[in-house]
């Protein structure tokens, strides 16, 4: 292992921070920042000082990748190979509500990828849908060419094309992956999945809150009208292009003119002069309405079809919350406080005690729930616009924390529990 | 003219509002609102050199400022408890001032209820005449060269070209894979000439087969749509007896292209069974046995995949089997330039010529020529959207779902 890695091991740093916490930290620092300790630094003349001083041991290199990101695998390195295929399929959110979606391996959300920090991951992306896709590895420190941004770091992967992603899993923590082609549509329309990088060193969360069960909850929303209209537009264009691929003369027609792709800003400006009408000037999206989600989901399902989170008295469970949509959500647990332990993958300087945690789009928060109050408890977005199905409450982003041993604790749950819709 | 149209709109609005106060046998939940659609088309042209014959029938007053074929329709639709969609559409269309138009300048061209699910569609009310709308031609207005481009209504007195294109229809359509459609229908075609044989009011029965390709590939597939049909029309014996018609037509992509497409439309029809042997009125020209063909060559230029301009040359010819030397032909050269989304500059040169035997039915006019220039605005909006179309590219490629 290179020296670089030795001195920057995530869990190493975290171990230190954990000790700092025990030295008496405030609670406010950890919520959105990655890493703040709180011991008092030496005052420096001419330096703007924060109201709450930064810790002396704060490491400004702490956000650097543990491994040099542009390294390639050496012979003998472990490589996890995943085959991921993108298709169009039908997903059922609740009984009676189906929608066409893009899917990673025919599932929504896509399969969870779980690897150890430092391991190599090879993903063979195969696109058998009529549209273009990529995969962006959200939160991973990888070589630019593997970042999955179409027309930014790679050409989008066309129908019946394949692309091989190869990167080293770093840093550890809860991350996710999603398609980056027309993200507004493609991620909403299904192309999202969780990506868990387990620490190579002992896990500070595990050490502090020994746990066996670990849940991943991807929070997302869907505007069925938007997805239907936009997907029809995209499928139409993809189907056209697929047919044009079989004719050399029609392939020449495609050549950027149809797609609105230009090599440089100057080319784009010239095309506009020559009659190219950019979509923002005249809508070709098939929808004139703003995107207004009518479905709010946890792992692709809305209440009452969401999976419950199971716990037992005395047990710690780790729940990984992923902001996989376009709206913030405020996840609230009844009857308990929980510990916010990691943000965007990285352990906080100190766990933060709370009962409602905001999950913004693109962020991940890990919380630890402790089995201290047996029963059946709502776990839901407290922005209750999102606890609706097609505008009707109850529904949406809501599930239950359920004690498996509630009966032993003397709770007559049969008398109160019912599924409502 | 405008005032009349507005009056009609207000009347329609009042009707809709009135309908809401009526009691539904089933309690309605106010939380659920149907999808509402509005679609319209404004067409106005300046017509020069027109002898009141081209397009219009030349029986009423003539105006060189022509706003006919402008339309506005409202629709309401919703998902039903099963997997079907229920909808209602109502709409009006301006008629040509040179048509008598029954003294009305707005013709109710749509007022029907529709039920559809994956396999079946049933509709009832005033709507497109199935036999007359197998395909539309790219003339400036849909009823330009109507004598060739649609199957004529043998009960019409010619006062209103809309009578060929719209009628009261009861139809059931069944499809296979949302691509092959068979439509079985009974109709009351508007009997302005009073030659219908029927007491029930149903004077026309027919069946139409239609193939509709994937809408994503209409510029690419060689034969994106085609169809054929048969119609039996109960014309009373004193007017020559029942008239039957067979017709077939379709679109051929001569140069499939999404940026510079060249296509050809053809419609051929032959009517038989009616004994009319002289053409004295316009009605005679619709029900007397005849053969007609319409052909249209069109170039659609869409740089960057977006329609920019179109020109088309449409020609039609018809001849009568039981009337000696009765025939006519018409041509139209049409041009459209897109000025913006749905807003077009349009222009057309048209010419029609009739044989002597034919001209008798047209007040002796043997020919007519017209130059037209004007503006068209096609628009539409959907409110409270909740219903997707059956034939979306996604449904066609990836299994239909009621969504
Ligand atoms: Cu994609």
Image (tube, helix red, strand yellow):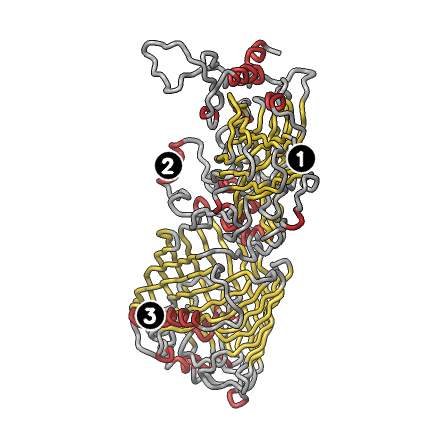
In three-dimensional space, the C-alpha distance between marks 1 and 3, rounded to whole angstroms, equals 72 Å
Residue under pointer 3: B5
Distance from the alpha carbon under mark 1 to that under mark 2 = 65 Å
Q: Quadrant of residue A270?
A: top left
Q: Are marks 1 and 3 in contact (CB under 8 Å)?
A: no
Mark toward the start of the polypeptide (1 vs 2): 2
Q: Name the secondary structure under disc 3.
A: helix
Q: Residues within 10 Å of mark 2 (few under 14, many from 20)?
A: few
Q: Which residue is mark 2?
A: A270
Q: Position of residue B76 (x, y in %)?
A: 47, 64
**Mark 1 Cα within 10 Å, few/some/many (few <14, many 20+)?**
some
Of discs 1 and 3, which sits in the foreground? 1
Q: Is residue B98 above or below residue B277?
A: above
Mark 2 lies on a secondary structure that is helix
Position of residue B207 measured from the top left corner of the image (x, y, whole percent): 60, 72
Which residue is painted at 30% across and 65% down in the image? B46
């Amino acid at each position: 292992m290179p020296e670089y890695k030795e001195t920057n091991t995530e869990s190493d740093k975290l171990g230190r921070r954990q000790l700092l916490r025990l030295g008496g930290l405030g609670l406010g620092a950890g919520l959105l920042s990655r890493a703040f300790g709180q011991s008092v630094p030496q005052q420096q003349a001419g330096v703007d000082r924060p109201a709450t001083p930064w810790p002396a041991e704060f490491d400004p290199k702490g956000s650097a990748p543990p491994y040099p990101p542009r390294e390639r695998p050496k012979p003998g390195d472990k490589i996890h190979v995943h085959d991921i295929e993108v298709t169009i399929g039908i997903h059922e959110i609740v009984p009676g509500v189906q929608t066409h979606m893009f899917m990673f391996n025919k599932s929504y959300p896509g399969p969870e990828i779980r690897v150890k920090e430092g391991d190599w991951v090879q993903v063979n992306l195969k696109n058998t849908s009529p549209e273009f896709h990529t995969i962006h590895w959200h939160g991973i420190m990888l070589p630019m060419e593997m970042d999955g941004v179409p027309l930014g770091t790679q050409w989008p992967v066309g129908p019946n094309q394949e692309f091989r992603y190869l990167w080293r899993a770093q840093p550890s923590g809860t991350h996710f992956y999603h398609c980056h082609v027309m993200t507004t549509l493609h991620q909403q329309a299904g192309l999202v999945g969780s990506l868990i990088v387990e620490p190579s060193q002992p896990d500070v969360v595990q050490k502090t809150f020994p746990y066996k069960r670990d849940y991943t909850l991807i929070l997302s929303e869907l505007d069925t009208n938007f997805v239907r209209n936009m997907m029809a537009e995209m499928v139409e264009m993809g189907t056209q292009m697929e047919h044009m691929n079989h004719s050399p003369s029609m392939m020449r027609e495609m050549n950027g003119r149809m797609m609105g792709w230009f090599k440089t800003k100057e080319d784009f400006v010239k095309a506009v002069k020559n009659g190219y009408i950019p979509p923002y000037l005249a809508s070709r999206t098939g929808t004139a309405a703003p995107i207004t989600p009518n479905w709010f989901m946890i792992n692709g399902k809305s209440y009452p079809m969401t999976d419950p989170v199971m716990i037992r008295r005395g047990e710690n469970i780790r729940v990984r919350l992923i902001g996989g949509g376009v709206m913030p959500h405020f996840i609230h647990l009844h009857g308990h406080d929980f510990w916010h332990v990691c943000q965007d993958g990285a352990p906080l300087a100190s766990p933060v005690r709370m009962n409602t945690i905001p999950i913004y789009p693109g962020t991940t928060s890990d919380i630890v729930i402790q089995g201290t109050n047996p029963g059946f408890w709502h776990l839901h977005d407290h922005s209750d616009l999102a606890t609706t199905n097609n505008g009707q409450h109850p529904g949406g982003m809501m599930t239950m924390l359920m004690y498996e041993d509630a009966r032993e604790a003397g709770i007559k749950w049969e008398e109160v529990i019912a599924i409502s819709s | 003219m405008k005032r009349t149209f507005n009056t009609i709109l207000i009347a329609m609005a009042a009707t809709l509002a009135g309908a809401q106060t009526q009691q539904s046998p089933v309690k309605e939940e106010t939380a659920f609102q149907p999808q509402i659609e509005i679609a319209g088309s404004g067409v106005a042209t300046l017509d020069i050199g027109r002898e009141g014959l081209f397009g219009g029938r030349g029986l009423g007053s003539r105006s060189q400022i022509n706003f006919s074929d402008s339309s506005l329709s409202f629709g309401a639709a919703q998902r039903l408890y099963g997997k079907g969609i229920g909808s209602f559409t109502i709409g009006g269309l301006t008629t040509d001032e040179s048509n008598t138009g029954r003294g009305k300048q707005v013709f109710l061209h749509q007022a029907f209820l529709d039920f559809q699910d994956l396999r079946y569609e049933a509709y009832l009310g005033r709507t497109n005449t199935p036999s007359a709308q197998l395909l539309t031609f790219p003339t400036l207005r849909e009823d330009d060269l109507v004598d060739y481009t649609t199957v004529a209504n043998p009960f019409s007195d010619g006062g209103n070209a809309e009578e060929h294109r719209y009628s009261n229809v009861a139809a059931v359509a069944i499809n296979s894979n949302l691509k092959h459609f068979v439509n079985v229908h009974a109709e009351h075609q508007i009997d302005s000439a009073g030659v219908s044989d029927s007491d029930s009011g149903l004077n026309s029965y027919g069946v139409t087969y239609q193939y509709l390709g994937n809408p994503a590939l209409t510029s690419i597939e060689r034969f994106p749509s085609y169809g054929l049909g048969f119609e039996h029309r109960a014309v009373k014996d004193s007017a020559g007896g029942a008239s039957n018609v067979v017709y077939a037509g379709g679109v051929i992509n001569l140069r499939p292209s999404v940026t510079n497409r060249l296509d050809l439309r053809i419609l051929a029809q032959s009517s038989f069974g009616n004994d009319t042997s002289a053409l004295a009125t316009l009605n005679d020209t619709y029900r007397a046995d005849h053969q007609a063909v319409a052909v249209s060559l069109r170039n659609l230029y869409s740089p960057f995949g977006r329609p920019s301009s179109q020109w088309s040359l449409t020609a039609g010819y018809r001849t009568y089997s039981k009337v000696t030397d009765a025939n006519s032909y018409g041509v139209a050269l049409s041009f459209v330039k897109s000025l913006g989304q749905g807003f077009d500059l349009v222009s057309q040169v048209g010419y029609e010529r009739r044989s002597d035997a034919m001209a008798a039915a047209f007040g002796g006019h043997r020919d007519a020529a017209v130059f037209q220039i004007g503006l068209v605005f096609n628009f539409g909006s959907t409110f409270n959207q909740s219903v997707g179309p059956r034939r979306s590219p996604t449904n066609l490629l990836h299994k239909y779902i009621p969504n």
